[in-house]
Image (spheres, grey):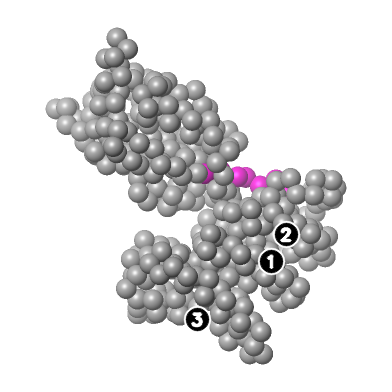
Amino acid sequence: MNKSVLQQILLESDWKSLREKVVNDSGIIRQLQSRVFVKDGLQFWRAIEGLGIAVKVLEDHKPGYAAELVRRYFWNLNEESGGTAWNASEAIGSIIAHCPKQCGHFNWMYSALLNDESLNEGTLWGLAQMACVAPILVEPLAEVVLPFLESSDPQLRGRACLVQAIMQGWGKNRTERMKMEHRQDKAKIELYVNGRLQVYSLAELLEPQIVYYWQEEMTIDEWTWNVTVATNAQGVIWVGLGDEDEEQLKIHCQRWYPQAFLLKRRLPNAQVLEQLHEYFLGQRQEFTVPLNPMGTSFQLSVWEELKKIPYGVTCCYGEIAERLGNPKAQRAIGMANNHNPIGVIVPCHRVIGKNGALVGYAGGIHLKEHLLSLEKQNDAARK
């Protein structure tokens, strides 16, 4: 790949293009490795993230690739020159976080990098990334991480605070004491989160904003979709049924929850998953989970109207516009419908064209057709 093309991909966080290109050009991995030699701000971190994403793609096509690359990093760390192991702690952390099943067995070896002062900052960052997606890998490492809560270096204290917060329940007595002390800590640190460099106080890292997300297959008859759901402390923020919905969720969070950490956990999403399963089985017509959609005031008003459309009933954009007292807003309502972050529960699938056509739907027209058919059949059966 041309160097300028890769630079543009990193500049725009265009991970879709990176995934497409790395399938046919594995040399992109070497380019990314070269790019992370120097810590030069945001572009360095984008390269670190890109490395993890690209390795995951190649791992899917060539099993064993990710583990072999991690082994090479560790081997180079034992060489005097370091070579491609420069900034290895961040690189390895990104690869393990993107390939936890294939590389999780390196967790203890990785945590040993905390013994090297030149690597411990990057290693704590990597452990936080691993804790977000695969806490089971970080769970046994408490005793090597928690001592950094008392470090004189705010960069290390802050990263240790974050790992401890993500690993909820670690060393309860010790961490409660540290929380009391760090609430008065005025130090701030910069972290790469949601594609950006963000500044956090230690108090914010002790009790960070968290978005919990999960993906699960759900079926209507013979059709199966990969459903992505996400919640925060206030309620459900996302239900998506598209093939690339995890990426769309991340983009949504970058806009509306820029400082939140995304944790892959099923339990906080158990209630909404259960109700969605019941819906897809035809056993539920109304949802009772709390919702917390984020959008413009106009979008929120449209989504409120969508929630009023009864199960098994459809309406057109013009009807929604009339209800909102703005008959000329049909196109804007269509756009708001398209940006609905909570599919199914906020039933944008029940809005159709004026002539009855099944106009666009994020999960695809086939899914919209199946949802409406499911509701029509079950509503008729109940009557």
Location of mark 1 (residue):
108
- CB under 8 Å between callouts 2 and 1? yes
Q: Amino acid at mark 1?
A: Trp
Question: Magenta residues, as a range?
Answer: 206-213
Query: In the rendered image, which quarter is residue 280 located in?
Result: top left
Q: Amino acid at mark 3?
A: Ser
Query: In the rendered image, which quarter is residue 296 located in?
Result: top left
Location of mark 2 (residue):
141
Q: Position of residue 344 (x, y in %)?
A: 37, 31
Q: Is residue 160 left or right of residue 229?
A: right
Q: Quadrant of the N terminus?
A: bottom left
Location of mark 3 (residue):
34
Checking the image for residue 152, the label placed there is none
| In this view, the mark in front (3 or 2) | 2
Query: CA separation, marks 2 and 1?
Result: 7 Å
Q: Position of residue 17 (x, y in %)?
A: 35, 65
Q: Position of residue 130 (x, y in %)?
A: 60, 58
Asked if residue 209 is among those painted magenta in the image, a careful observer would answer yes
Query: CA separation, marks 1 and 3?
Result: 26 Å
Q: Tally the marks.
A: 3
Q: Nearer the viewer, residue 378 or 255?
A: 378
Q: Position of residue 343 (x, y in %)?
A: 38, 35
Q: Is residue 372 above or below residue 17?
A: above
